[in-house]
Amino acid sequence: MKLLIDFLPIVVFFLVYKSAPEFIELISPILNSGQIDYLNSLEPIILATAVLIPATALQIAYTRMTTGKFEKMHLITLALVIVMGGATVMLQDKTFIQWKPTVVNWLFAAGFLGTHWITGKTLLERMMGQNLTLPAPVWVQLNYAWSAFFVFSGLANLYVAYNFDEDIWVNFKLFGLLGLTIVFIIAQSLYLYRFINQEER
């Protein structure tokens, strides 16, 4: 469920991009003719980016209401969506929003590595240590695995953005990155299974 909530703004971005005329028609009752003409003049990716910004803010508000706290990763993502998404909308340049997933992933990689190197304790252990007991080397291995995954995801995003057309990149932004995340989480779960079994014996 949490994974779906995390990807919800991307789903909204995808749906608006794929059905921009229908989206404008849907919200037209609350707009004046000038606003409708302006939205119709925008490229779908610019319109989708403009919708992504409030969608991300609503995601964070929902998380705050249901969990009672803000997640740092969500706040970092929101900041980058506002900065890079805002630049995309104002300058009418999709480059900024195409770089956003890469910047987010690389910042997460830096956070995972930096926390371990500076404090001596991995970020994963801080997040999951109360619910899962693992040997210290395993926490370190998982930390490096997540860091590598974030670096790879950022590189994959740039590869698709610069080697395929815009429509394929939008598909990859949702299905590709989500698929990679699910596969990685499954692989991590299989890796952890033996340690969980040992703990239960």
Image (tube, helix red, strand yellow):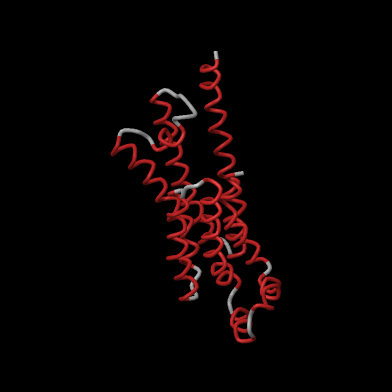
Tell me which residue sits at (58%, 35%) in the image.
186
Tell which residue pokes out farthest to the bottom in this image.
34
Position of 153 relative to 45 (above/below): above
Instruction: Residue 106 in the image: state x and y as whole percent.
Output: 41, 50
Residue sitting farthest toward the left: 118
Horizontal and vertical percent for residue 156? Answer: 50, 51
Please state if 10 lies on the left or on the right of 127 as rendered. Answer: right
Residue located at (56% from left, 33% from top): 187
In which quadrant of the rendered image does the C terminus lie? top right
Q: Residue at x 50, y 73 (%)?
A: 89
Please state the total of marks drawn on the protein image. 0
Residue 193, position as x, y percentages in the image: 56, 24
User: In the displayed structure, would residue 144 be above or below residue 4?
Assistant: above
List the single residue furthest toward the top.
Answer: 201
Residue closer to the observer: 93 or 16: 16
Picture quarter with the N terminus: top right
The image quadrant that residue 45 belongs to is bottom right
Relative image position of residue 9 (x, y in whole percent): 57, 58
- The answer to which image quadrant residue 113 occupies is top left
